[in-house]
Image (tube, rainbow, N blue to C red):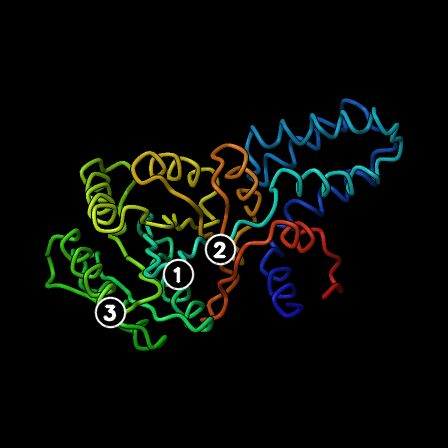
Amino acid sequence: MAAFFSKLKDSLKKTRQNFVSKVTQLVSVHKKIDEEFYEELEGILLQADVGVAATCRLVDEIRHEVKQRKIGETAEVRELLQEKMKELLGEQASLEINTTPPTVILVVGVNGVGKTTTIGKLAYRMRQHGKEVLLVAADTFRAAAVEQLEIWSERTDSEMIKHMAGSDPAAVVFDALQAAKKRGIDVMIIDTAGRLHTKTNLMEELRKIQRVITREIPEAPHEVLLVIDAATGQDAMRQAELFKEATKVTGIALTKLDGTAKGGIVLAIFEELGIPVKLVGTGEGIGDLRGFDSHEFVRALFAEEDER
């Protein structure tokens, strides 16, 4: 666990430089907590892509606590901000694993966010927990997507279901559901075509896949994971809103956290959409996908350079 904290801390380095270092500078420069102080704090939060709603909530709550606790030292606001961020993010939200197999996980997202790679890492994670995994190639329009999934199937020793290029994605999913039941598969992970969230016909295809799943297993899919590239910042919010309308997204898998200064998007997602971040990618290694722990996230974000 200490090793993962260290990895998470390193992955948040750019966000820490863009956000926490500015907060630290703010509290050291200002001698009193006045309106100018709050305005500058608000600006720092917005620049880190915390979002308008989450920023307003955090600043309002800090104002209230400063009055309630009669806080006079600006340095105490740094600790108060951490406290309020943890409260906003709430407790850890784990992946829903059904007691009766198979657990069906539908993975969606736009092109280029690392969706298939996330599926491969998730399969590895499940295999590490002793689960039998079936990967489903429901992205039938891009031959490279099937090939990429096949590589992950081999790397993780997972089974795989695929059809010919251009096949109906819902038909692939139907066959996979039958196979999963027969083979006693624990977890079925469905890869879908990367799509622009503005394409209504492709979003309708996702709805069709979801209907097929629910018809075969009424309580499924147990998870609909939306993969988001952390570097997209506020554009990720628009993606999430439209995918949520089409597929009832249950959780976010946040990728490329190590390559962005926009880690504050985590707070915006929680506050504005009410969708928990359930998985976070902290690097390119096969084991660099872990469950998202909100308290650990805030601790790693505010960690000192030598803290491990």
Question: Marks 2 and 1: in contact by CB < 8 Å?
Answer: yes
Q: Secondary structure at mark 2?
A: strand
Question: Marks 2 and 3: in contact by CB < 8 Å?
Answer: no
Amino acid type at mark 3? Met
Looking at this view, name the residue that lies furthest to the top.
Answer: 35
At a point 50% along the width and 44% down the height, the residue shown is: 276
At a point 74% along the width and 30% down the height, the residue shown is: 62
Residue under label 3 = 160
Query: Which of the two discs, 3 and 2, labels the residue nearer the N terminus?
Result: 3
**Residue 127: x, y in percent?**
41, 72
Is 209 left or right of 16, judged from the image as shown?
left
Query: Which of the two discs, 1 and 2, labels the residue nearer the N terminus?
Result: 1
Is 145 left or right of 25, judged from the image as shown?
left
Front in this rendered view, residue 165 or 223: 223
Residue under label 1 = 118
Front in this rendered view, residue 184 or 15: 184
Amino acid type at mark 1? Thr
Q: Which mark is residue 279?
A: 2
